[in-house]
Image (tube, rainbow, N blue to C red):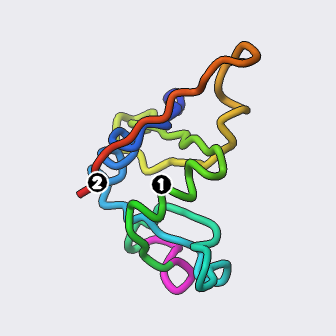
Amino acid sequence: MSAAKVLTDHDEIWAWAEKRGAIPSDVASTATDDDVGIIRLDFPGYSGEGTLSPIEWDEWFEKFDANGLALLVQEKTADGQISNFNKLVKRETVEPSKKKGAAKSKGTSAHR
């Protein structure tokens, strides 16, 4: 397996997902009127059918940032094929420690 890459930039995540046909989604059983619940990327034709519901990118990124998440992705498989591997993790588990009091940068972007 090729190395995983950590993504937190909205445009990079959107581009990675779009290239693979992934749709921003939530786990339907966790969503309420006030909260999208647990977020996922849905790859149509795979195991998300019936359990995941499409949501807007803005909603997905709002939850992503509010929970301090990062997306681990793999670009290609060991045999060179495009990979859909992705995993949502806490940013603090994949980012180097920041000095106390240092400001975290927040990227903003428009999504299509």
Among all residues in the image, which is located at the extreme top?
99
Q: Label 1 is placed on what type of residue?
A: Phe
Image-based side of 10 in relation to 111, left or right: right
Q: Quadrant of the C terminus?
A: bottom left
Residue 22 lies in quadrant: bottom left
Residue 93: which disc? none
Image point (72%, 13%), residue name: 99
- Which residue sits furthest right? 100
Find numbered disc 2 in the image and state the secondary structure of the residue it sits on. Answer: loop
Residue 29: x %, y % from top left:
65, 83
Looking at the picture, tell me which residue is in the foreground, 74 or 56: 56
* Residue 1, above or below 88: above
Amino acid at pointer 2: His
The residue carrying mark 2 is 111
Q: Residue at x 62, y 52 (%)?
A: 66
Highlighted range, magenta: 46-52
From the viewer's side, name the closer residue of 4 and 89.
89
Query: Residue 92's x, y, as percent?
Result: 71, 32
Residue at numbered disc 1: 61
Residue 48, position in %: x, y? 51, 74
* Residue 45 inside the magenta-drawn segment: no
- The secondary structure that most of the magenta stretch takes on is loop
Of all residues, the one furthest to the left in this rendering is 112
Residue toward you, 7 or 20: 7
